[in-house]
Image (cartoon, rainbow, N blue to C red):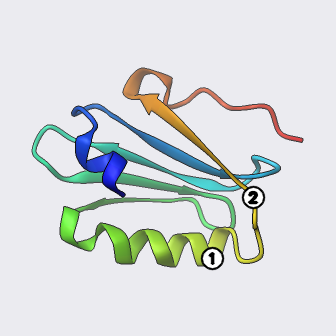
Amino acid sequence: MEQLKKVAAGSGVEVLTYKRNRGLTLIKRKDGMFWVRERGYRDEEYIIQEKELLRTVRGILKRECPRSRKVRIYSISAERLNVMRKVL
């Protein structure tokens, strides 16, 4: 979460399960809000404030990665948002 506060607008973080078939993407917007995309059991998008970010991310990770001990974290920019990563 600290990494997200320091990132420039238009960039963010992608958190994926070890198999890379489920996860979430967090992009910081210019207005200070965050764009969150959930991909896996649910395919949803949210625009939330920074103070709601931690609670929302915890809920998504419990749903998408309930037993995962290994996750992959990637730094991304807005241009690479639709690039799919290899699935194991």
Residue type, numbered disc 1: Arg
Q: How far is the residue under mark 1 from the one under mark 2? A: 15 Å
Position of residue 38 in the picture relative to residue 71 (left or right) = left
Q: Say the numbered circle drawn on residue 46.
A: none
Instruction: Specify which label sits upstream in the sequence, 1 or 2.
Output: 1
For badge 2, the amino acid type reads Lys
Query: In this figure, which residue is indicated by the disc labeled 2?
Result: 70
Q: Residue at x 48, y 75 (%)?
A: 58
Q: Give the percent coordinates (x, y) of residue 86.
A: 79, 32
Q: Which residue is mark 1?
A: 63
* Left or right: 78 in relation to 8: right
Q: Is residue 27 above or below residue 41?
A: above
Q: Quadrant of the C terminus?
A: top right
Residue 49 visible to an observer of this rendering = no
**Element type at mark 2:** loop
Residue shown at the point (19%, 53%) measured from the top left: 33
Is residue 8 something that shows in the picture?
yes
Residue 39, image quadrant = bottom right
